[in-house]
Image (cartoon, rainbow, N blue to C red):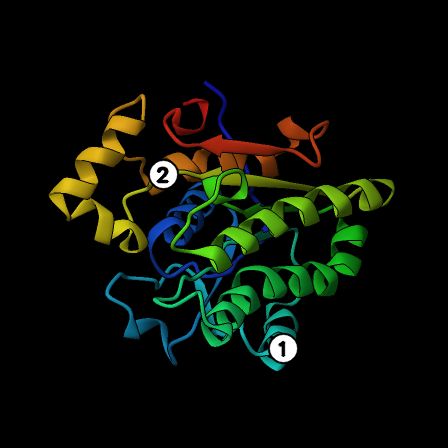
């Protein structure tokens, strides 16, 4: 069994306070990394989970000024995980659409740009957290779909450009994972049954399973992989 060792490495995980982000942050910390997480609340203690093992920085990623402050406060990092994301109840309005695009796509793009010089110096890597929506349409969530599709294209483009700098950029695309964001489907019996019928594995994934793919792409064992996406969806996309 491959054991990942990130001792001496610093990882920044945006949106690392819960769900997939917390699963990723925990896995990196368990593998020896110093882990910085961001969230929107004033203090780490404002969240339900114990985040004391991480360095917490408040950042509202829909605000460009906060993105810059986050990078400055984090200092030199070796690994950037762009995980923060959101949906909106009305993505068929420009207000709702814009909010989702700002956090899910624009923030990830700007953080990549801001962190690139330091990552180039340190031989660092980026893993963007996309979604199955990077590959298929979610009709009730056009902004979420557009943001995650855009993130896939962005990942490929900068991976091509930055390979010459020694910076690898990849993406992990989760399917339906047991998180707060999917609770509306999972807790609705009719919707949940329909979704599980569409997933060959016949279950929802866990944040730890997404984290495993993320650690692999960030690790030296994946040094010849860039511009790629790993789908963690229990087989949903093969249907």
Rendered position, 178 above or below 1: below
Which of 214 and 109 lies nearest the eye of the viewer?
109
Rendered position, 100 above or below 233: below
Q: In this view, does 138 lie to the left or right of 46?
A: right
Is disc 2 placed on a helix, strand or loop? helix
Q: Are marks 2 and 1 in contact (CB under 8 Å)?
A: no
Identify the residue position indicated by label 2 in the image.
Answer: 208
Q: Position of residue 236 (x, y in %)?
A: 39, 28
Q: Where is residue 85 in the image (x, y as percent from the top left)?
A: 46, 60
In three-dimensional space, the C-alpha distance between marks 2 and 1, rounded to whole angstroms, equals: 30 Å
Identify the residue position indicated by label 1 in the image.
Answer: 64
Q: Which residue is drawn at 30% across and 73% down?
A: 45
Mark 1 surroundings within 10 Å by alpha-carbon count, few (fewer than 14), some (14 through 19), many (20 or more)? some
Q: In this view, does 45 lie to the left or right of 14?
A: left
Q: Where is residue 210 in the image (x, y as percent from the top left)?
A: 42, 38
Q: Is residue 178 left or right of residue 148?
A: left
Rendered position, 228 above or below 53: above
Of the 4 image quadrants, the one containing the N terminus is top left
Which of 70 and 132 lies nearest the eye of the viewer?
132
Of the 4 image quadrants, the one containing the C terminus is top left
């Amino acid at each position: 069994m491959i054991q990942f060792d990130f001792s001496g490495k610093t990882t920044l995980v945006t949106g690392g306070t819960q769900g997939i982000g917390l699963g990723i942050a925990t896995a990196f910390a368990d593998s020896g990394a110093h882990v910085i997480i961001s969230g929107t609340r004033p203090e780490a203690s404002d969240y339900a989970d114990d985040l004391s093992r991480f360095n917490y920085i408040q950042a509202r990623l829909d605000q460009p000024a906060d993105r810059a402050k986050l990078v400055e406060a984090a200092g030199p990092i070796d690994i950037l995980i762009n995980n923060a994301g959101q949906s909106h109840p009305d993505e068929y309005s420009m207000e709702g659409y814009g909010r989702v695009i700002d956090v899910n796509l624009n923030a990830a793009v700007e953080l990549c740009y801001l962190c690139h010089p330091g990552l180039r110096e340190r031989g660092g890597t980026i893993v963007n957290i996309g979604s199955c929506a990077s590959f298929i349409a979610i009709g009730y969530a056009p902004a979420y779909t557009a943001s995650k599709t855009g993130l896939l294209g962005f990942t490929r483009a900068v991976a091509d450009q930055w390979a010459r700098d020694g910076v690898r950029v990849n993406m992990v695309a989760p399917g339906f994972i047991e998180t707060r964001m999917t609770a509306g489907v999972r807790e609705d019996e009719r919707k949940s049954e329909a979704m599980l019928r569409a997933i060959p594995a016949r279950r929802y994934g866990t944040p730890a399973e997404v984290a495993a793919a993320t650690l692999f792409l960030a690790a030296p064992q994946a040094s010849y992989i860039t511009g790629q996406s790993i789908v963690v969806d229990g087989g949903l996309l093969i249907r």
